[in-house]
Image: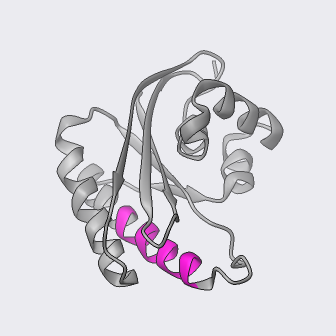
Amino acid sequence: MAVLGICVVPGGGAPKLHGVIADGTFEDPIIVDSFEVRTNSHEASEQAVDLARLLLAKLPGLRFSAAAIRIAGTTPVPRRNKAAFSRAHAEGAALYVLREHLKSPVATGDPKALAKSSDVPYPELEATAKGLLKSKADATLAALSQLPKS
């Protein structure tokens, strides 16, 4: 059962979306594919729309049967309220696109919530994700959280 993990990364005023497809089991995961899409828009609502459109265009070429989105925590980082605000919009837009594509619920949560839902200790889930694909560790963490345990 391949799982697509998504994470929206704010950066330089224009967020990007990381995607990772993992397969296998949590104990023996395989990274099948990874990608990144970015927007050049500076308006929060347009950033969300751009990322959703880019993700929608990418989905037909990907094979997965479940998805999870690593969402930001509820407390914005000081002086980065706009980044957290646009990130929430982009996460919601990605959630909608994935839900419509899969026709089934998409798991969402911050890293600790995803670890709890997968019944894997957070430090272990985080270390495994970083060990597999450090450059997209948060998206990898989301995908790993939905893999079955052997």
Residue drawn where x is 42% and y is 58% of the image: 16
Residue 48 against residue 138 in the figure, above or below: below
Where residue 81 appears, as percent x and y from the top left, is 62, 84
Residue drawn where x is 75% and y is 32% of the image: 127
Quadrant containing the C terminus in the rendered view: top right
> Quick one: which residue is furthest to the front in this view?
12
Where residue 101 appears, as percent x and y from the top left, is 24, 53
Range of residues picked out in magenta: 82-94
Residue 52 against residue 31 in the figure, above or below: below
Residue drawn where x is 55% and y is 84% of the image: 82
8 or 93: which is nearer to us? 8
Q: Position of 41 compared to 5: left or right?
A: left
Magenta residues, dominant SS class: helix
Residue drawn where x is 67% and y is 33% of the image: 130
Is residue 91 on the magenta stretch?
A: yes
Residue 9 against residue 41 in the figure, above or below: above
